[in-house]
Image: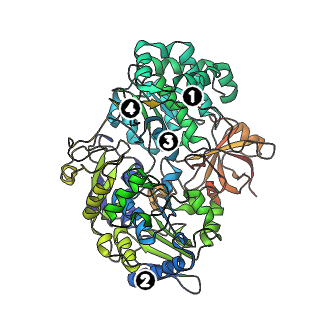
Amino acid sequence: MTLTPGRAPDGMPALDVTPRDFPTNAGGLCQKGWTSAALLTSPERLTTPLVRDGAGVLREAGWEEALDLVARRMRRAREERGPDAVAVFGSGGLTNEKAYALGKFARVALGTSQIDYNGRFCMSSAAAAGNRAFGLDRGLPFPVTDLDASEAVVLVGANPAETMPPLMGHLDPARLIVVDPRRTATAQAALDGGGLHLQPAPGTDLALALGLLHVALVEGYVDAPERLAYRRERTTGWEEVRRCAARWWPERTERLTGVAAADLRKAAGALAGARRAHILTGRGAEQHSKGVDTVAAWIDLALALGLPGTPGSGYGCLTGQGNGQGGREHGQKADQLPGYRHITDPAARAHLARVWDVPEESLPGPGRSAWELLDALGTPDGPSALLVMGSNPAVSAPRSRRAVERLRALDLLVVADFVRSETAELADVVLPVTMWAEESGTMTSLEGRVLRRRRAQAPPPGVRTDLEVLHGLAVRLGRDGAEFPADHTEVFAELRRASEGGAADYSGVRPEALDAGEAVHWPAPRGRDGSGTPRLFLDRFAHPDGRARFLPVEHREAAELPDAAHPLYATTGRELQHYQSGAQTRRVPELAAAAPGAYVEVHPDTARRAGLADGDRARVVSRRGSVLARTRCVPTLRTDTVFLPFHYTGAGTANALTNPALDPVSRMPEFKLCAVRLEPAP
């Protein structure tokens, strides 16, 4: 998009947003995009550091005072309890440069293993499943424009009509098969256009995938000569997966999922009969204590039909944050080093030690995952100080009131943000930083395309970039300032060296190509054609033998199920007007007016049994807490399910209900399913 000076309806100066004609959005923006410039001039912008005084009040302070205080107390924590006494929590919304610098700051300036980020709550299950199956994780291993010609697209737990509307321009509703417990705007678009909506019970997507694969088996869809050759030449492990699917005949699948056997057969036939087809998963499939296995089941279905690595077809994951792809590649995760390297790999550690010019043995090992890190804050064995950059875990974390308790228990909480988010309100020090239009850097799209973001205007006086914050803290912690440059071009040059040879290799990404608008997809090794790799896996998968792995998985129940005291499933998600924890969008007047507060969607019969009518105030109660929300009766919802958006705070914080049960591989919490009851609010 391009920003130009303009006028607001009240005559005050404002910024006009003009979308660019770009392949992924074709010149379109959603409502959040059109209104995104409003926050740049909002009276709620932070422009001065805040320090909590002896009375517990956040007061204005100078930058030198604030940074000196943070560095002094971080040093004290490390001296008293070791380097892991200080933790870092990052964001999938940071630029590539900031994500890289934050990971380096944690491991070099602080020497801590305690770093993770909010992307652990978004794409980690799909990433783990993709790495296991293909040897490499990239959200879409093909350009988004490949979806234009797809004859069947299965969307599992994804609602792009509300969460990323420009993507709908690449999806023909008549060819959509939407898997979702709700009739979302995306599901309705599919039905209106002649597509399909499969509406399973929450937590049963894995069984549904096995049921579809069973139909493909018995109907002979997987026995087409080209599919037999694909599995023989390009995969391993098919026989064990075939035996798993054989046990999920349509009627058994229907009894568990609630999806009619006839609809299973229709969906399998549409998918298998398409010459070009795609399966795309979203948070609805991933945010479970069995999210990795669930995604693996859908990948197994894709492999059985020969989709991944076939031109015009494939499997992909829809990333959920502004830099959801790039944010997970360069070292913010507890177990990861830049270039998508694993922190326990000796070769990876040696490479980064050379780039960073530090002793290899000084690099810490893997730390706690996001929820485990938050849950350990302020405990005897956990960190006593935390730096949060670009995240709002007080709202976005599962069992959010427990997360707030742990944040309050810290000796030092430092938050870098541009508004007083719910997490910033708990902080000892708040550092005002630049917004997206006030800094330059690179982002990486869900299709692995590296994008240049140029500064459109100067930040308000008194505001610094995140890179300047990290530079200032690193110097105060005794590091040479040259190790932590504040210039994004210097950081990107180092990132290219650090990623070289890794799975996400940026070494051949030429800044001048990005400046010229050329399409560059990672991996882009040095010396290769400048476009990188738009389509992965066309010749071989990323495992050493070049083959994809079928992963045998079985359905298992969610970590908690409804019972007499909590008889309903609750699931959470996003709505059109708001984004993530809502810290930004709730401050945009147009968006706040359109979606002003918490609500709970419920079937009219379910509401009536609970003594509620449309518009009534309801209390939603789980085993961890309760939420107050307006009842919104939705006749298309399942009678055993309620839905809450997670953007709101206070008494309407949906994540006060959610279960922090973790996937054993990805450490993703089970956001998408918890048992609740519904009752009238007093």
Residue closer to the observer: 525 or 92: 525
The amino acid on which the numbered mark 3 sits, given as a three-letter code, is Ala
User: Could you give the CA–CA distance between mark 4 and mark 1, rounded to whole angstroms?
Assistant: 25 Å
Say if mark 4 contacts mark 1, CB within 8 Å. Answer: no
The residue singled out by tag 1 in the image is 209
The amino acid on which the numbered mark 2 sits, given as a three-letter code, is Asp
Q: Nearer the viewer, mark 2 or mark 4?
A: 4
Q: Residue furthest bottom?
A: 54
Secondary structure of the residue carrying numbered label 1: helix
Q: Which circle marks residue 126 in the picture?
A: 3
Say if mark 3 contacts mark 2, CB within 8 Å. Answer: no
**Vertical side of 514 occupied by 126: above or below:** above
Residue 463 spot, x, y in % from top left: 35, 74
User: Could you give the CA–CA distance between mark 1 and mark 3, rounded to whole angstroms?
Assistant: 15 Å
Res. 594 in view: no
Mark closest to the chain's N terminus, 3 or 2: 2
Mark closest to the chain's N terminus, 1 or 3: 3
Q: Is residue 496 left or right of residue 171?
A: left
Q: Residues within 10 Å of mark 1 (few under 14, many from 20)?
A: many
Q: Which circle marks residue 546 in the picture?
A: 4
Q: Residues within 10 Å of mark 2 (few under 14, many from 20)?
A: some
The residue singled out by tag 2 in the image is 68
Residue closer to the observer: 645 or 593: 645
User: Could you give the CA–CA distance between mark 2 and mark 4, rounded to whole angstroms?
Assistant: 52 Å
The amino acid on which the numbered mark 1 sits, given as a three-letter code, is Ala
